[in-house]
Image (cartoon, rainbow, N blue to C red):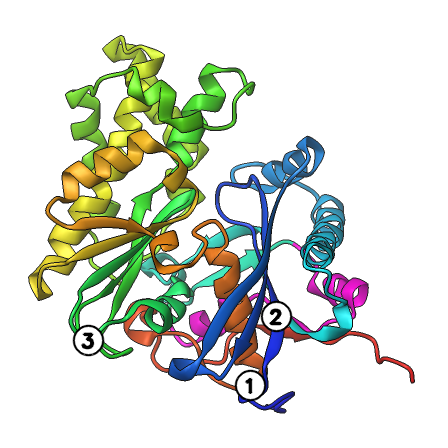
């Protein structure tokens, strides 16, 4: 691997993240120096760029079980390449930074399908992302690292959660045990027991985050609302124990890590099953949204109890992701986790909204430095791997 710059050099990097919620792109511009455990990170700018209804429609049409043509796939990939490039340029403009000053862009492009290792695929997992990274590099003039997960999957891993590496760098502590909990479309946790090394940590998807809540809100409002603003709908409802019991019986929850999940498990098809059950139970809209919100809190708490607490109790849970903006969800989770103290990234001087984009900027930077940045103990890979595929920009003429 060519070393494009020295680790000691202070440099700028951009991270682009489109998560499982399929609502848009989070873009972060960071200043960083050092690498691995000596890395320093400062956020310079953050932007959230929603997908247009046309862009989101293009993506949704490609999600299973929909059928599509090679032409539709190809053209959506090109369109999204332009959209991601625009997001990178927009966050640089916000910070008044010229693209020539930025060393690398790390892009988690929209995931079409994630297929972790299983008996069904003979243990050979794979993933398809849809946005052409070469277009990002061409439009911005910046080396772009995308498709970060496949190298870990080629080594037998799940390709996720890749955030474990950055969670450890930012939050490990010699005396405080923490769970770094992201609540996006899917919720994932990195467990950092006091004094743990990188090879000790656990990191896995706990289950659905906002995905089912958002699906319910879109359904009951006929797409007038995309999510439960301030958790106000859930706050008006009450739990249906029959539905919650059925939800908690989902086999994914009891599966031991390493494990990952996504829209293929907790997406539209599963929500259709949920909706059918709510009709038979005679539930109100508010009760459905409340029960699904409690479900997210319960699955997170269950994951801690089953997989984290056997190695020692936790002192803190550090929340990030869109779910942090749902006060009802945060309150339910805090009640369920007590006496664990619930904090946010902002309590540590970081932006929870920008966190995933920051992660991809750091991971891409490690790639250009030639450093592996997966955590095999978390992903299940046989060994460490240098992540991603690099698209180089056109040469700059002098």
Q: Earlier in the sequence, mark 3 or mark 2?
A: 2
Q: Are marks 3 and 2 in contact (CB under 8 Å)?
A: no
Please give the count of numbered marks on the rendered protein. Answer: 3
Q: Which residue is mark 1?
A: 369
Residues drawn in magenta: 131-156
Under circle 1, the secondary element is: loop
Percent position (x, y) of residue 87? 69, 52
Q: Quadrant of the N terminus?
A: bottom right
Percent position (x, y) of residue 235? 30, 20
**Mark 2 packing: few (<14 Cα in 10 Å), some, or many (20+)?**
many
Q: Which mark is on residue 13?
A: 2
Say if 192 sits above or below 219 in the image.
below
Q: Is residue 340 magenta?
A: no
Q: Which mark is on residue 174?
A: 3
Residue at 38% of width from left, 30% of height from top?
Answer: 213
Q: Are marks 2 and 1 in contact (CB under 8 Å)?
A: no
Residue at 45% of width from left, 54% of height from top?
Answer: 351
Of residue 370 and residue 320, the one placed in the foreground of this image is 320
Say if 156 sits above or below 23 in the image.
below
């Amino acid at each position: 691997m060519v070393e494009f710059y020295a680790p000691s050099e202070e440099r700028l990097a951009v991270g682009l993240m489109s998560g499982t919620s399929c609502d848009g792109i989070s873009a972060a511009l960071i200043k960083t120096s050092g690498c691995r455990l000596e890395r320093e990170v400062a956020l310079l700018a953050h932007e959230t760029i929603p997908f247009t209804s046309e862009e989101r429609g293009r993506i949704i049409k490609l999600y299973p079980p929909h059928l599509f043509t090679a032409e539709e796939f190809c053209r959506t990939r090109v369109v999204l390449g332009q959209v991601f490039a625009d997001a990178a340029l927009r966050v640089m403009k916000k910070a008044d930074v010229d693209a020539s000053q930025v060393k690398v862009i790390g892009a988690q492009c929209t995931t079409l399908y994630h297929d972790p290792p299983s008996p069904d695929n003979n243990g050979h997992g794979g993933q398809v992302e849809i946005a052409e990274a070469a277009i990002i590099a061409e439009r911005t003039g910046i080396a772009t690292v995308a498709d970060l997960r496949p190298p870990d999957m080629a080594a037998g891993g799940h390709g996720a959660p890749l955030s474990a590496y950055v969670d450890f760098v930012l939050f490990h502590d010699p005396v405080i045990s923490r769970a770094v909990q992201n609540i996006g479309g899917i919720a994932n946790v990195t467990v950092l027991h006091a004094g743990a090394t990188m090879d000790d940590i656990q990191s896995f998807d706990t289950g659905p985050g906002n995905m089912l809540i958002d699906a319910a809100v879109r359904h009951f409002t006929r797409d007038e609302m995309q999510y439960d603003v301030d958790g106000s709908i859930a706050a008006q409802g009450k739990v249906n124990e029959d539905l919650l019991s059925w939800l908690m019986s989902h086999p994914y929850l009891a599966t031991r890590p390493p494990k990952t999940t996504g829209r293929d498990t907790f997406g539209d098809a599963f929500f259709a099953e949920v909706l059918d059950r709510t009709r038979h139970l005679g539930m109100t809209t508010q009760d459905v949204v409340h029960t699904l919100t409690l479900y997210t809190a319960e699955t997170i708490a269950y994951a801690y109890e089953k997989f984290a607490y056997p190695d020692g109790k936790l002192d803190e849970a550090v929340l990030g992701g869109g779910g942090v903006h749902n006060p009802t969800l945060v309150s339910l989770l805090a009640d369920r986790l007590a006496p664990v103290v619930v904090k946010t990234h902002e309590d540590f001087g970081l932006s929870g909204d920008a966190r995933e984009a920051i992660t991809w900027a750091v991971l891409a930077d490690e790639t250009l430095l030639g450093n592996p940045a997966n955590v095999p103990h978390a992903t299940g890979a046989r060994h460490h791997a240098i992540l991603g595929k690099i698209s180089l920009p056109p040469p700059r003429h002098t």
